[in-house]
Image: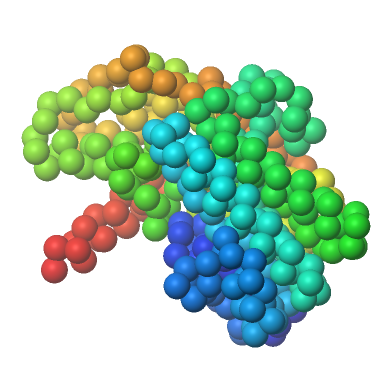
């Protein structure tokens, strides 16, 4: 197990994943959880990152920072997604090696896998086929990140590990309809429809694609488990091992948020990858499994969203 008295740096602590990681580390008794805002250190700037690492000397790093978004954001901002994420992982990994960080966990994304992978997706399917075009730039940057972890291990002996989470949701998610992922977008759409009394809610695509969803608090717990128990070079999938169709997800969110609504699918909009279910047998074999059921997780995510709206209105 990693030393709870030593400083651990969580990048991207204001985001959904980073904030969940900070909560989990503090609950686990870590005495020094380090964070930095973009104003304090721009993770795209190597000199700034080097200076921060020299000043704070973290023993461990959980690298959760990144520029993220849904299909629309990925399709309209590919250069930004590629540049930001390439630079963010390159600077942090280099500084972690240079300052002899004892262990680093790099968080990737399940979109690294080929579009038409056999299901469920095993770790060895990486780089065996073309990527999904709607998020290709982001996926390439994340692949570069995990390959960088492997390179630092092989050349310098760094204990850098990487984990590939499935689709995530929970507190501090992005609910902006132009840049969010499918779960928060649907929660927002049904909530807005309930407020206006609209009889219908339009869902992008056919509703047939299948996705796996994990609550971000489960991911944070898995990350701490991996920091304590995993030291292999090969990346490891993190998920729940179950999926639902987008249509089923829409029905679940409707039942929680606005049961009176009729769901209408707009088949002119892109579906994205037909199915994306991770094979999590290696993680299960190590002894970790998720705890938060999908319905309970969606309900809690909606409660969090409503609480933020209430705070903004005061």
**Closer to the camera, 62 or 148?**
148
Residue drawn at 66 percent across, 62 percent down: 91
Residue drawn at 27 percent across, 42 percent down: 188
**Closer to the camera, 39 or 301?**
39
Question: Where is residue 80 drawn, in percent x and y?
Answer: 49, 45
Residue 122 figure quarter = top right
Residue 1 visible: no
Residue drawn at 58 percent across, 78 percent down: 34
> Is the residue 196 above or below the residue 163 in the image?
above
Q: Quadrant of the C terminus?
A: bottom left
Question: Where is residue 239 drawn, in percent x and y?
Answer: 61, 43
Question: Where is residue 225 drawn, in percent x and y?
Answer: 70, 61
Question: Where is residue 213 drawn, in percent x and y?
Answer: 50, 40
**Closer to the camera, 61 or 276?**
61
Residue 229 figure quarter = bottom right
> Is the residue 100 above or below the residue 279 in the image?
below
Q: What sort of colour scheme is used for the picture?
A: rainbow
Residue drawn at 33 percent across, 15 percent down: 268
Q: Quadrant of the N terminus?
A: bottom right
Residue 245 visible: yes
> Is the residue 6 above or below the residue 104 in the image?
below
Please state if 18 lies on the left or on the right of 308 as rendered: right
The number of numbered badges drawn on the structure is 0
Residue 179 figure quarter = top left
């Amino acid at each position: 197990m990693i030393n709870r008295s030593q400083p651990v740096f969580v990048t991207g602590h204001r985001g959904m994943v980073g904030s969940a990681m900070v909560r989990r580390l503090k609950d686990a008794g870590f005495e020094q959880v380090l964070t930095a805002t973009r104003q304090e250190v721009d993770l795209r700037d190597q000199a700034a990152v080097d200076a921060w690492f020299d000043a704070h000397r973290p023993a461990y790093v959980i690298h959760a920072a990144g520029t993220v978004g849904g299909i629309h954001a990925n399709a309209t901002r590919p250069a930004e997604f590629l540049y930001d994420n390439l630079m963010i992982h390159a600077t942090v990994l280099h500084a972690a090696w240079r300052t002899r960080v004892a262990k680093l966990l790099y968080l990737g994304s399940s979109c690294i896998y080929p579009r038409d992978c056999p299901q469920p997706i095993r770790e060895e399917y990486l780089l065996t086929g073309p990527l999904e075009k709607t998020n290709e730039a982001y996926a390439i940057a994340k692949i570069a990140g995990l390959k960088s972890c492997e390179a630092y291990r092989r050349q310098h002996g760094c204990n850098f590990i990487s984990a590939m989470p499935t689709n995530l949701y929970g507190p501090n998610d992005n609910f902006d309809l132009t840049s969010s992922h499918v779960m928060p977008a649907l929660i927002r759409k049904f909530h807005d429809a309930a407020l206006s009394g609209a009889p219908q809610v339009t869902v992008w695509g056919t509703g047939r694609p299948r996705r796996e969803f994990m609550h971000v608090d489960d991911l944070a717990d898995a990350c701490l488990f991996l920091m304590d128990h995993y030291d292999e070079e090969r990346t490891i999938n993190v998920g729940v091992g179950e999926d639902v169709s987008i249509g089923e997800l829409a029905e679940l969110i409707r039942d929680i948020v606005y049961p009176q609504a009729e769901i209408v699918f707009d088949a002119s909009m892109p579906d994205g990858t037909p199915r994306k279910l991770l094979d999590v047998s290696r993680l299960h074999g190590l002894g970790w499994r998720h705890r938060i059921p999908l319905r309970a997780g969606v309900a809690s995510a909606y409660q969090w969203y409503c609480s933020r709206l209430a705070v903004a209105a005061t």
